[in-house]
Amino acid sequence: MGTKRHLVKRFFGSLLPGGPRERNRAWVESVLSESEYRLWVRMYGPDRRHSVLVARTVESRLGDEATKPILAAALLHDIGKLDSGLRTWGRVVATMSAAVAGADTARLWQKSRGFTRSVGLYLRHPDLGGDMLEMAGSDPFASTWAREHHLPPDEWTIDRRLAEVLCEVDDA
């Protein structure tokens, strides 16, 4: 959904080095499949911290309804950002570029080289993440949420109430 407040909060959070604490890393490993965990550990440290915060908050809000596929969706919804290789400042430029040129331009940029390609890949992270999760054998709920987490609510195909919780927590 990408509210300005959310983007500012994510920016400042990304300036802190390192990933989540060991107890959270161990919890993630217990939630994800082996192939999903291998993807998760490749994420940029601040992204892993954010994913844990999202998943733990989803778990708190949903209680027993927070199944492993739902928690995997919370942990891995941004996994497609891996392909871009962009860090904080590159992501700022990518987000601003999309605001100016439009997100639809990402497909063209993705076909170019260098930084422009990285921006295109970053902007297409929902679709790329969905593909990565399918290839990792994730539950369809997780791969679908990765694809849909930036879509407007009327385009969500997963359970509306669960999508609202995942979206609200991610954007908080």
Image (tube, rainbow, N blue to C red):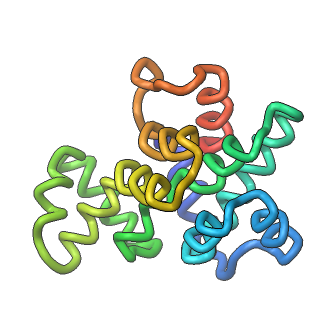
Q: Which residue is pictured at 60% across the width and 63% down the height?
A: 36
Q: Is residue 61 left or right of residue 169?
A: right
Quarter of the image with the C terminus in it: top right
Q: Which residue is pictured at 62% across the width and 44% down the height?
A: 170
Q: Is residue 133 visible?
A: yes
Q: Count every numbered label the image shows and give the total.
A: 0
Q: Which residue is pictured at 79% across the width and 45% down the height?
A: 57
Q: Quadrant of residue 38?
A: bottom right
Residue 164 in percent (x, y) is at 62, 27
Position above or below: 69 against 46: above
Position above or below: 160 against 26: above
Residue 51 in percent (x, y) is at 66, 58
For the residue pair 78 and 70, the one nearer the viewer reads as: 70
Q: Which residue is pictured at 53% across the width and 41% down the height?
A: 140
Residue 161 in percent (x, y) is at 65, 21
Q: Quadrant of residue 122?
A: bottom left
